Image (cartoon, rainbow, N blue to C red):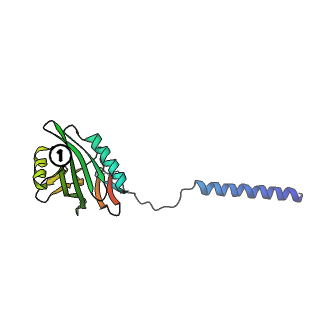
Amino acid sequence: MKKWKFAFIFLASFNLLCILLIGGYLFIPAKTDKQVLPKVSNQDETVPFLIKSDKESLTKLINHYLEEETDQENLQYRVDINNYVNVYGAIKAFNKTIDMQLVLKPKIISDGNLQLQVKELSIGRFQLPVSYVLTYMNTYYDLPSYVKINSNKKVFNIYLNELTLKNGFTARAESFDLEKDNINFTVNVPLP
């Protein structure tokens, strides 16, 4: 046999053997421990996400939510967040519209809920006694179930742990530092 025929057959056989070995290794299952992975979907389980925001973005979100979700016929208001949470609104009384301003200082309660301390409350140009007005609001306004007013301490408590959004999301406040513009929430997303 001529040398070139022998070299050709040898090289062709070697290439075929390499292709078979590589193909065999590709289709052989990998060695793994046969451990059972836990089920991912549990009805009661949620996945937390940390959401970082700033005053401007949170102001837009709150005002959008107020516009979409609240009945603003008798009490119209908007929120502006700067060094405090400012609520500007209009109250209809005696067939007139009267301007209102509420200045609030936010604080996170240890359980991740928010407390808003009333610093100032004015209707028109008059500063009113805060505890009296809060008692009136608590009695006559239909507030959401997750908002509680403590007129003696002059605070609004917003129980985020009682607020469940339409998609099942819940939230917890982590930081609410308006001076540093550092606002963080944990949003818990339920698993399907």
Residue 150 relative to residue 189: left or right: left
Q: Which residue is mark 1?
A: 143
The reply to whether residue 185 is visible in this rendering is yes
The reply to whether residue 191 is visible in this rendering is no
Q: Residue at x 69, y 55 (%)?
A: 19
Q: Is residue 192 above or below residue 3?
A: above
Name the residue nearer the viewer: 36 or 58: 58
Q: Quadrant of residue 182?
A: bottom left
Name the residue nearer the viewer: 173 or 164: 173
Q: Where does the image place residue 145, in percent across and percent down from the top left? A: 18, 47
Residue 40 relative to residue 111: left or right: right
Q: Where does the image place residue 86, in percent across and percent down from the top left? A: 26, 53
Name the quarter where the N terminus is drawn. bottom right
In the rendered structure, which amino acid carries the disc numbered 1? Answer: Leu
Q: Residue at x 32, y 44 (%)?
A: 64
Q: Residue at x 23, y 45 (%)?
A: 89
Name the residue nearer the viewer: 114 or 101: 101
Q: Residue furthest right?
A: 2
Residue 110 relative to residue 40: left or right: left
Name the residue nearer the viewer: 112 or 36: 112
Residue 34 relative to residue 91: left or right: right
> Could you say whether the residue bearing mark 1 is in a helix, strand or loop?
loop
Q: Where does the image place residue 65, in percent across and percent down from the top left? A: 30, 44
